């Protein structure tokens, strides 16, 4: 594609994405469906440009003020994911001079918000939590997330799958914490890789794998994944149960559960039972009250721990919306707790980095439910032989950060019913 045409396409996609009517990945996918003439290289450039603009939106908007022409074009120029010589061939002389001026700006000349590119309402609580590590955390959020795989240990061994992927030209290494994980170098396509086709691996962030591990589901148990979504953790739990017992994958979205079906077929699991529910007090939930051995509540949340993958969330989420999310989290956790029998285990988790969605929810639950005893996550990780478990916890909770652990931001708390 000619440089000018590609830059025009980037500007249009930036314009559509910055309307924030839909998640960025959905906007990009729709754009590609509407422009099927785009080749793989053009798609990669378009996608990477948009996500770079989202990651560094405050900086690029600051720089764009000194330029001319449509704002989305200026942002696309600044974020263009390709050689500078290529994009410059699409610019007029005025634009070239402006871009050179922008490229000459040093970080020391910038205000802090133009370096960390986070809204103030989010930057403040992050600084309070990580202190001197804030710059490292903010920098990690500007990077692309790693591509992690979970090996299906129902029928596969991680060492053998690693050898197979290496032989196929996919460079990978074991994840440092999860016993099931492999971290890939780069972002290779997996659709036609034999290990993926037969269900030997599934794409899943290492932090998400640890949430499933903490549930510690055993053979023959009755288990519920209460907010299963597309079922990444469901599949990990089902394999841990050795394809025995009964595992309910519940979600209020039948559409998300539909996405589980092809993954379930590849996994060779027969103990998983998808169940669409209307809400957390659905009759299907009530019928199982007091009968379940283990429940995972991977609660709906702001998703702000996934900013490496979903940088649009820091602009689409608003502080006033967090209160609504926490009310939903509290209601879901209370309902899920009723499922457990005496001695049953409850795991509450989010992919958020905000205390309101994490520690505050967990502490409130403990105060309101004296029939549940909280378990220190460190003790459980140590018992499960997770390496360097002491580095993964904050008090009794699991707390994962991208700059410390190379995962998305995750939280988890564990209780046992008396």
Image: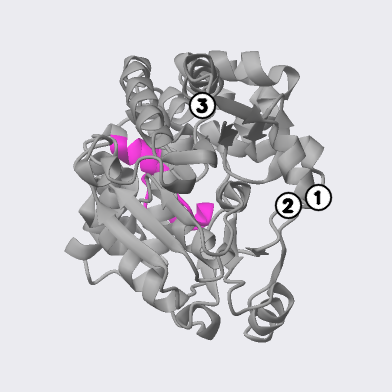
The range drawn in magenta is 72-97
Residue 75 placement (x, y as % from top left) = 38, 37
Location of the N terminus (image quadrant): bottom left
- What crowding class fits label 1: few (fewer than 14 Cα within 10 Å), some (14-19), or many (20 or more)? some
Among the 4 quarters of the image, the one containing residue 314: top left
Q: Which one is earlier in the sequence, the residue at label 1 or at label 3?
A: 3
Label 1 SS: loop
Q: Residue at x 51, y 26 (%)?
A: 117
Residue of label 1: 387
Give the mark nearer the N terminus: 2 vs 1: 2
Q: Is residue 152 visible?
A: yes
How many other residues sit within 10 Å of disc 2, few (<14), some (14-19) or many (≥20)? some
In depth, the one of 151 and 310 nearer the eye is 151
The answer to whether residue 307 is visible is no
Which sits in the foreground, 258 or 42? 258
Q: Establish if 207 lies above or below 361.
A: below
Residue at 70% over, 31% down: 376
Q: Which residue is mark 2?
A: 177
Q: Which residue is mark 3?
A: 117
**In terms of secondary structure, where does tag 2 sit?**
loop
Of the pair 388 and 190, the residue shown nearer to us: 388
């Amino acid at each position: 594609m000619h440089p000018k045409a590609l830059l025009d396409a980037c500007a249009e996609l930036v314009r559509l994405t910055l309307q924030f009517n839909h998640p960025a990945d959905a906007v990009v996918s729709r754009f590609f469906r509407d422009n099927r003439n785009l080749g793989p290289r053009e798609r990669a450039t378009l996608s990477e440009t948009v996500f770079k603009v989202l990651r560094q939106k405050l900086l690029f908007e600051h720089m764009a003020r000194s330029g001319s022409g449509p704002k989305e074009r200026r942002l696309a120029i600044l974020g263009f994911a390709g050689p500078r010589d290529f994009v410059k061939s699409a610019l007029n002389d005025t634009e070239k001079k402006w871009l050179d001026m922008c490229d000459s700006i040093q970080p020391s000349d910038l205000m802090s918000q133009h370096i960390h590119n986070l809204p103030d309402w989010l930057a403040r609580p992050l600084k309070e939590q990580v202190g001197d590590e804030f710059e490292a955390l903010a920098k990690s959020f500007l990077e692309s997330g790693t591509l992690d795989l979970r090996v299906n240990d129902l029928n596969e061994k991680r060492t053998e799958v690693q050898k197979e992927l290496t032989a196929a030209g996919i460079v990978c290494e074991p994840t440092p914490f999860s016993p099931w994980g492999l971290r890939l170098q780069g972002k290779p396509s997996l659709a036609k890789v034999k290990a993926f086709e037969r269900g030997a691996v599934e794409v899943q962030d290492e932090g998400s794998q640890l949430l499933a591990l903490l549930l510690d589901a055993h053979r023959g148990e009755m288990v519920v994944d209460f907010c299963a979504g597309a079922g990444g953790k469901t599949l990990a739990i089902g394999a841990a149960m050795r394809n025995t017992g009964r595992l309910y994958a519940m979600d209020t979205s039948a559409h998300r559960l539909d996405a589980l079906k092809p993954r379930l077929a590849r996994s060779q699991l027969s103990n998983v039972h998808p169940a669409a529910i209307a809400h957390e007090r659905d009759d299907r939930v009530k019928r199982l009250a007091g009968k379940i051995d283990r429940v995972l509540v991977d609660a709906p949340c702001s998703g702000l721990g996934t900013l490496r993958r979903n940088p649009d969330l820091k602009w689409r989420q608003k502080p006033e919306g967090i209160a609504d999310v926490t009310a939903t989290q509290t209601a879901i956790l209370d309902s899920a707790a009723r499922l457990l029998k005496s001695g049953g285990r409850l795991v509450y988790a989010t992919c958020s980095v905000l205390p309101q969605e994490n520690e505050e929810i967990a502490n409130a639950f403990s105060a309101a439910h004296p029939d549940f005893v909280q378990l220190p996550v460190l003790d459980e990780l140590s018992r499960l032989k997770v390496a360097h478990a002491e580095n993964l916890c904050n008090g009794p909770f699991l707390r994962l950060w991208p700059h410390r652990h190379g995962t998305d931001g995750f939280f988890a708390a564990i209780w046992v019913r008396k």
